[in-house]
DNA sequence: CGTGATTTTGAAGCATTTCAACTCTGGTGG
DNA sequence: CCACCAGAGTTGAAATGCTTCAAAATCACG
């Protein structure tokens, strides 16, 4: 049933892609998760269920600002987000600190601790959050008996590696406006994949945090958002300007495409 | 002898590593790997030996420009670099392409393929290179019998995740000059950890490639290198300006420290 | 109903890109 | 052997995108 490759992937490119346009009717299509997104959600649910049935898990509820773990702390546990939003923050010896990752339901935390035996960053709850924690050694033991667990674990690590590379690519090839648009697109996509609606998303970060994550100043983030709103790609729905309406994800993606930096277009070699 | 130029050694991992510390004498200390670095080298050697003894491995020799795998190709194998230098290149649908990783002896390739069942990037040899390839499924099978293998595998994935975060941080918090310095520092450190000398390193990338990797133009890379040379932090040793002498790694690190961008210094929250 | 935090917006300054010209190197063929 | 050429690197000057600095508006919280 559950093994390395399949489950979470469409992986059957020849399968007929369901068109699934007709019955939707009233609602804006972009707001509803696509078929693929729903499959991802299904995969997350299955993975969490499998974990729940095979490994001893400790549930923890955290509030905004609470830390699941801190840099330097001895690595013992891995964690999975069940509810809420979590950011990982790297802080270097020289005082730099940097948001290096955002984590949603089903995402794992703490992989960076395996190699060195201690966590390499802080994991901070961005609002009320439920995290499942398990001992790494007992997870490994469980993997011996339930090979499907290995698939879940490796898939999660693999996905994180891919995700980090996409981030790197955005940082290197997109100008500020497009980077902000891409950030929103990714956030919305993540929600869609978890069965949540994406036409109305609530940012749980200040402009300063977003800027830190995207490698720009808070003013630039603010200007980019204003520009996106003026262009009709997004709209603000509350006074605090934390809630954002995305009429159509495809439009947002189109904005990113059109704004690929020139330097990114040059083919190497 | 210690030599950066990769002679294709006949890979006898269980061979006794000659310590070769005392008799060197004459050379500047910074050029020699530290104790910690030697431990890392030891770890790499042990990991390769373990792999060699427990998994069916296919050796492949590649030349500059050859691809170990390409984006979209079905994921079957994982790979480990035994000799040489390899870059991974992400190419997006919209034409952006981007160097997202550099890989040295002992580094793994292909983790990004696990989740989706196909590779997410290209892996390209930067010069003559020997790669060990193994089927992922047979590696998993071998892990059942040799639990130490799981440790090696997870450590490698964990290290890659940490490394990617460090890259992200450099991109976000360092100005161009310091980013180039940090790039050199990392390259030298990687050599040191593999028992190679670091006072004289040969870049296997054009300025354009370095710039692409670091998110800047080739002109900016060139200017940064010139500036570092003028400041005495590095020196060019050949006419083509590909060979670089690093008098003291600590000085290079100091340069990075002093050039942390202002935005990085602001503490979040 | 203040007070501090967050956000927006403008204007000036600066780092990096862009454009352009030039040098240098290494390889190829007459 | 040398002329020639393409590729790689350097360097300058102008253009530009982002940051910095500053001020005002708005929101959240006790």
Image (cartoon, coloured by chain):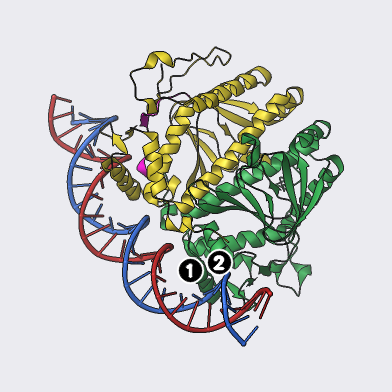
Chain colours: A green, B yellow, C blue, D red
For the point 46% across and 58% down, the residue is B263
Q: Label 2 is found on which chain of the structure?
A: A
Question: Is A232 displayed left or right of B147 in the figure?
Answer: left
**Measured from the top left, where is residue D16 in percent x and y?**
36, 66
Q: Label 1 is found on which chain of the structure?
A: A
Q: Mark 2 and mark 1, same subunit? A: yes
For the point 52% across and 45% down, the residue is B166
Does the rendering let one see residue A169? yes
Does the rendering let one see residue B203? no
Q: Nearer the viewer, residue A173 or B175?
A: B175
For the point 48% across and 67% down, the residue is A220
Q: Nearer the viewer, residue A121 or B69?
A: A121
Quadrant of the rendering where the N terminus of chain B is positioned: top left
Quadrant of the rendering where the C terminus of chain B is positioned: bottom right
Residue found at the very far right of the displayed protein: A53
**Measured from the top left, where is residue B225 in percent x and y?**
32, 43
The answer to if A64 sits in the magenta stretch is no
Magenta residues span B195-209
Q: How many C-alpha atoms fall within 10 Å of the one at disc 2: few (<14), some, or many (≥20)?
A: some
Q: Residue tagged by mark 2?
A: A207
Question: Is A55 displayed left or right of B116 in the figure?
Answer: right
Q: Is B81 located above or below residue B91 in the figure?
A: above
Circle on res. A219: 1
User: Badges 2 and 1: C-beta atoms under 8 Å apart?
Assistant: yes
């Amino acid at each position: 049933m559950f093994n390395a490759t399949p489950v979470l992937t469409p992986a059957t490119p020849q399968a007929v892609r369901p068109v699934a346009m007709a019955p939707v009717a009233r609602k804006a299509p972009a707001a509803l998760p696509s078929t693929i997104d729903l499959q991802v959600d299904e995969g997350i649910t299955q993975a969490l269920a499998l974990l729940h049935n095979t490994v001893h898990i400790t549930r923890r509820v955290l509030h905004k600002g609470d830390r699941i773990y801190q840099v330097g702390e001895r690595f013992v546990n891995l964690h999975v987000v069940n509810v809420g939003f979590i950011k990982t923050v790297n802080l270097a010896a020289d005082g730099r600190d940097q948001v290096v990752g955002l984590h949603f339901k089903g995402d794992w935390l703490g992989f960076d601790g395996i190699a060195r035996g201690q966590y390499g960053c802080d994991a901070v709850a961005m609002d009320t959050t439920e995290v499942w924690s398990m001992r790494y050694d007992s997870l490994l033991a469980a993997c011996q008996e339930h090979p499907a667990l290995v698939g879940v674990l490796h898939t999660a690590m693999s996905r994180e590696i891919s995700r980090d590379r996409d981030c790197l690519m955005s940082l290197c090839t997109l100008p500020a406006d497009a980077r902000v648009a891409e950030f929103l697109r990714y956030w919305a996509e993540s929600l869609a994949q978890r069965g949540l609606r994406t036409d109305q998303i609530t940012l749980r970060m200040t402009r300063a945090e977003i800027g830190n994550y995207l490698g720009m100043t808070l003013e630039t983030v603010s200007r980019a958002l204003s520009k996106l709103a003026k262009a009709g790609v997004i709209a603000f729905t509350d006074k605090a300007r934390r809630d954002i309406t995305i009429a159509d994800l495809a439009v947002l993606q189109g904005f990113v495409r059109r704004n690929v930096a020139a330097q990114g277009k040059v083919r190497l070699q």
